[in-house]
Image: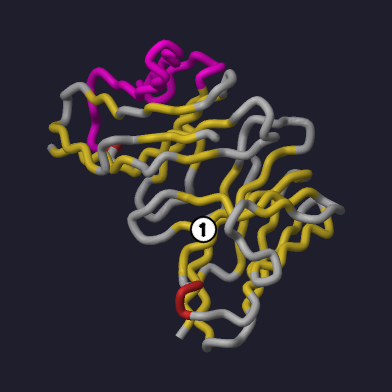
Amino acid sequence: GAVVSQHPSRVICKSGTSVKIECRSLDFQATTMFWYRQFPKQSLMLMATSNEGSKATYEQGVEKDKFLINHASLTLSTLTVTSAHPEDSSFYICSATLAGVTDTQYFGPGTRLTVL
Amino acid sequence: AQRVTQPEKLLSVFKGAPVELKCNYSYSGSPELFWYVQYSRQRLQLLLRHISRESIKGFTADLNKGETSFHLKKPFAQEEDSAMYYCALRGNNAGNMLTFGGGTRLMVKP
């Protein structure tokens, strides 16, 4: 149980376009989802915390107008990278916590974004 | 502010040797500490958490508040332990937000 999926697993886009990444909890309800960014050979950096039905909380330095997060249901959160630039190329990972269980995050497999 | 430091980016040992992956943290309150593992081509997954005081796959970790450390140990490393290990901290006033260390790649040689 507690499986988190991400779609797509890999995406290549042109500079200036927008890309949407989906994060789904497949067999549980996730009141909270998290979005991380991982640069090559570096650790995960939390971008934002997303609670179902409310606005996401962004970490310092993360542009909320550039990285749009929507958490419309208990099983789906989306991250949209708007007007993507090559420096946005990275590995984006989401995680989710079970409703009512607060201390374990279940991670998705990640999405590799390459902006040309 | 909370911070997690893993001083070693790479740790290479022979099969059967003891392993210790270091993790130090900085946090003013009482944190919860976790170890996550990422095997090759797999997603990040929880290995163990300090509140459980459990041994998973032979690994243990003890929270030392005096030294602000949460080192991961295993007495006899196995080749299948080769992976990327991340230490993470959750503050007691930060919801579920995790702060990750930089990670340590463990390579267990035959």
Residue B96 located left or right of residue B98: right
In the picture, the quarter occupied by the C terminus of chain B is top left
Between A67 and B84, the one nearer to me in the picture: A67
**Residue sitting at x 43%, y 51%:** B42
Q: Give me the chain letter of mark 1.
A: A
**Residue sitting at x 25%, y 18%:** B75
Residue A61 lies, in percent from the top left, at: 58, 58
Q: In the rendered image, which quarter is residue A40 located in? A: bottom left
Residue A76 located left or right of residue A116: right
Q: Is residue B34 above or below residue A94?
A: above
Q: In the rendered image, which quarter is residue A16 located in? A: bottom right
Residue B95 lies, in percent from the top left, at: 70, 34
Tell me which segment is drawn in magenta: B50-79
Q: Main secondary structure of the magenta part?
A: loop
Between B102 and A109, the one nearer to me in the picture: B102
Residue at numbered disc 1: A37
In the picture, the quarter occupied by the N terminus of chain B is top right
Q: Is residue B58 above or below residue A71?
A: above
Does B3 lie within the magenta span? no
Q: Is residue A47 visible?
A: yes
**Residue sitting at x 16%, y 33%:** B13
Q: Is residue A64 above or below residue B78?
A: below
Residue A60 lies, in percent from the top left, at: 61, 53
Q: Is residue B33 above or below residue B66?
A: below
Between A20 and A106, the one nearer to me in the picture: A20
Q: How is the image coloured?
A: secondary structure
Amino acid type, residue under disc 1 in the picture = Arg
Residue A35 located left or right of residue B10: right
Secondary structure at badge 1 equals strand
**Residue sitting at x 24%, y 25%:** B19
Q: Is residue A26 visible?
A: no
Does B56 lie within the magenta span? yes
